[in-house]
Image (cartoon, helix red, strand yellow):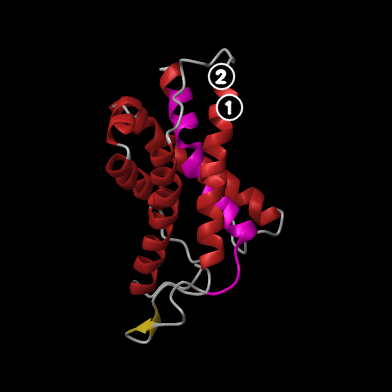
Amino acid sequence: MFESVIVALWAMLPAYVPNNAAVVVGGGRPIDGGRTIGGRRLLGDGKTWQGTIGGTLSGILTGVLLNLLAVGLPIDGLVPTFPLLALLGLAGGAMGGDIGASLVKRRLNRERGSPVPGLDQLDFVVGALICTPILAPGWFFDTFSPAVVLIVLVITPLLHLGLNVVAFRLGLKNEPY
């Protein structure tokens, strides 16, 4: 069980980093260009090209750094190394999941930053877990056993909420969830 927790956290780091990095590097032009559906913004000002690209690149860079760290450490052989397509699936999928959640929230008439429990904590995980097996199926199914997926689904909401509270207290987010 302990090994599955280590693998889950390690394998998901390239998906965990992008949304947090997007907050830091974001800004600029909104992805939706101000477009509306039914009088409501498609995504809103919080989803920008700069944040999406910066977040995705930060996730990819995280995976590259993890690949370098794994070599020679006691965890070498326990944790996976990341092929580029897996990193693109994890990081890009995480950002895509977050964008999809924003679209859903706008359709539910929720304002930017308003909570939708469950969706807010797992949107990026779902995006990563959908995109990665499409781009790197062999790596995904070798890495994400049912136990690892279950651990990811249980531990991610706790990590997400904890990091959001920290970002809120640092003034990087407007809400602590």
Across and down, in percent, residue 164 comes to 58, 51
- Residues marked 2 and 1 touching at CB (< 8 Å): yes
**Looking at the image, which residue is at 53% across and 69% down?**
46
Question: Is residue 177 at all visible to an observer of this figure?
Answer: no
- Taking the magenta stretch, the answer to whether it contains residue 46 is no
**Looking at the image, which residue is at 52% across and 58% down?**
53
Q: Farthest bottom residue?
A: 39
Looking at the image, residue 121 lies above or below residue 172: above
Q: Closer to the camera, 38 or 15? A: 15
Q: Farthest front residue?
A: 84
Across and down, in percent, residue 166 comes to 65, 48
Report which residue position mark 1 lands on: 68
Q: Is residue 105 left or right of residue 20?
A: left
**Image quarter (top left, top right, bottom left or bottom right) of the N terminus:** top left
Q: Amino acid at mark 2?
A: Val
Magenta stretch, main secondary structure, is helix
Question: Is residue 84 at all visible to an observer of this figure?
Answer: yes
Asked which secondary structure carries label 2, the reply is loop
Which disc is residue 71 wearing? Answer: 2
Pointer 2 local density, CA inside 10 Å: few below 14, some 14–19, many at least 20: few
